[in-house]
Image (tube, coloured by chain):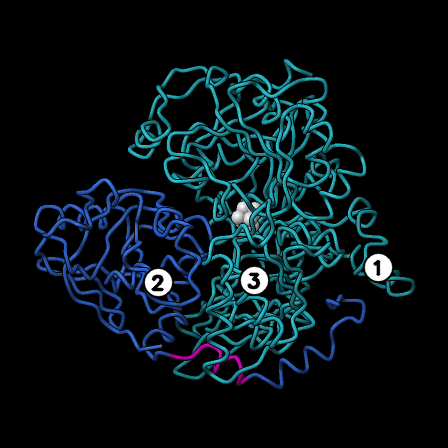
Chain colours: A cyan, B blue
Amino acid sequence: MSEANKAQESKEEYERAGRTSHVELEYYRSGRAVGCVSGTNFGRRVCVELSFPMPKTLAQKLWDSHVVRVAPGEPDLLYVDLHLVHEVTSPQAFEGLRLSGRRVRRPDLSLATMDHNVPTQGGVRAADDLSRRQMETLAENCRREGIPLYQIGSRRQGIVHVIGPELGLTQPGMLIVCGDSHTSTHGAFGALAFGIGTSEVELVLATQCLPQKRLGDLAVTISGELPLGVTAKDIVLGLIGRTGTSLGQGHLVEYRGSTIKGLSMEGRMTICNMSIEWGAKAGMVAPDETTFKYLEGRPSAPKGEAWESALEYWRSLATDPEAPFDAEISIDASQLEPHVTWGTNPGQVAPVTGRVPQPRSDTDERALKYMDLLAGTALADIAIDRVFIGSCTNARLEDLRAAAQVIKGRHVHPKVRAMVVPGSTSVKRAAEDEGLDLVFKAAGFEWRNAGCSMCLGMNPDILAPGERCASTSNRNFEGRQGSGGRTHLMSPPMAAAAAVTGHVVDVRELL
Amino acid sequence: MEPVSRVSGRMAPLDRADVDTDQIIPKQFLKRIERTGYGPFLFFDWRAPGDFVLDRPEHAGAAVLVTGANFGCGSSREHAPWALRDFGFKAIISPSFADIFLANCYKTGLLAVTLPERQVRHLIDLASEDPSAQVTVDLEKQEVRGEGFAYRFEIDAFARECLLGGLDEIGLVERHKSAIAAYEAGRATWLPAVK
Ligand code: SF4
């Protein structure tokens, strides 16, 4: 009998004995973790502890290990191990602190970078006045509060979700937050990581804590061998095509199964990154040898004895065999094809061998109109104007390598303007050490400095109205890459293939 | 934060599902470093061609936005609820909200309320047919009511308390200083600090 059933049975027994009314079932999953049936009996609060250990999911283990305080009827108070900060969602939070006379509690557990609106060429001088003011404000706030900052021009600057892992700051078992919804990326390391709003940024700056309501658990099990030309991006696009954009709401997701086990950290990050696109609060993967190998020797990873103790703990971070999930989704990776979005949300997606579908809702109809597409058009016939290889989803070294492999010896189509924006300054340097920049430049790509760039178009890199872009980013919302611009999401090899052919194309034809 | 207990007024219908935060407040307006002044840029791209539903005279001054499911999906930008508030909305009714957006609404003092699809449909139709129809979103009674109807809604008890009391959440957390310090003292020594 599952533990949840046992708890339910005890509750019913308790009620049958007529000892309580309005009995509610509550799990106290903190610390020594037992079940607890509680309720009121003629106004007096009663509580019966259940004496079985509860098997836990990875997400529950991560949650429980960060609980500072639980109280019935209140959200749990969680402790934050790492708070990532960037220029766009933080100024009002710092301002709030100042107005209330508060200081940052743990500047040493905070890290700031500039990514969202940095120009990718020409340095800070190329930024518009407002962007520059935002960057200066961040620098000033960090200086005042003693928060480390990797600003534009720094060797370690980059997209916030790219630099955390590459510095070894993102580690298994941690709780990581950032004023950015794609914070879920860090979950790839077996961390609990999610995005927060500016008021919450202020709260974390002041207290290093965050009150959070417990969330549900979902499992996505992905098994089978990925076919040639199919990537982690296609797994997650295929998943969102099935779930739609909101199924994950109110849930923490664990990605698992043989395919996930076989993926690199980069691939796992791509999948966790897009958890938010199907509504999930966070996505995660249990840490394993791949994780440890990635981390070992990175600047902020533990060393020596500390490494050994950390490793021992990290190995315990897996879902217990009988731990209950609210639901499980299974995907057979061996049947997947490269995917492309055709609409204005990531759920409007299809295999590249398919056609633009018949609209099934008002949302679909509006999307087709915005995208200027007719139902029935073969996806591979869609001509493109721009290519963007970048973003926290797909701009790590492995992504650039995969794109370069397709491009090598070929040239960007004459009607296409294509650019590569590495996810971080370190990624850029590493790519240049391998000569990838030369491959891209020889093919006619622009080779830029690190930043979010055309993922959201806050800097000068934007689409003109009506332009159509093959993009490795994560959101194809209306106007996301520039007002009136049209975005087709795909993997780096697919975007590279589109660049050389001038239209959406099945990359497998070029391999 | 100002306490919020009840919002009364007219409704504006935005009959679309999956409205994302990039539509609510496009990125070019996220460069401000202030918490206010976002109202003019609400739904900027949708309003640009003219005759957007929120700009029609009959909906001017509406206090309650009624809209489709999964409202506020996408980014964590709190600028989205700020823009809705600055535009004049005090409450939003939808069949569902994206998680981060919902949390941001509460922090902004925007009363975001979920009702079943069927009831939201009724409100959208009502607002379209009779823009002068009045509704009250009553947080105390957990009810949306108007002429001839009263719909009960569920809301997280703690969020409700915070809204009703206008509570300063940082202040609330700071009361647990000793628990925080105790937790901090027990953290594993290998955990990274940023240098
Ligand atoms: S790359 Fe795009 S999705 Fe990632 S943090 Fe930057 S803007 Fe957000």
Residue behind mark 1: A312
**Residue A175 versus residue B181 in the image, above or below:** above
Q: Secondary structure at mark 1?
A: helix
Considering depth in this image, is B184 or A67 the residue closer to the camera?
Answer: B184
Q: Amino acid at mark 3?
A: Ala
Question: Which range of residues does the magenta coloring cover?
Answer: B167-175
Residue A496's spot in the image, x, y percent? 62, 25
Q: Amino acid at mark 2?
A: Trp
Q: CA distance from mark 1 to mark 2?
A: 45 Å
Q: Nearer the viewer, mark 1 or mark 2?
A: 2
Considering depth in this image, is A306 or A492 the residue closer to the camera?
Answer: A492
Q: Amino acid at mark 1?
A: Glu
Q: Chain of mark 1?
A: A
Residue behind mark 3: A7
Q: Chain of mark 3?
A: A
- Which quarter of the picture shows residue B50? top left
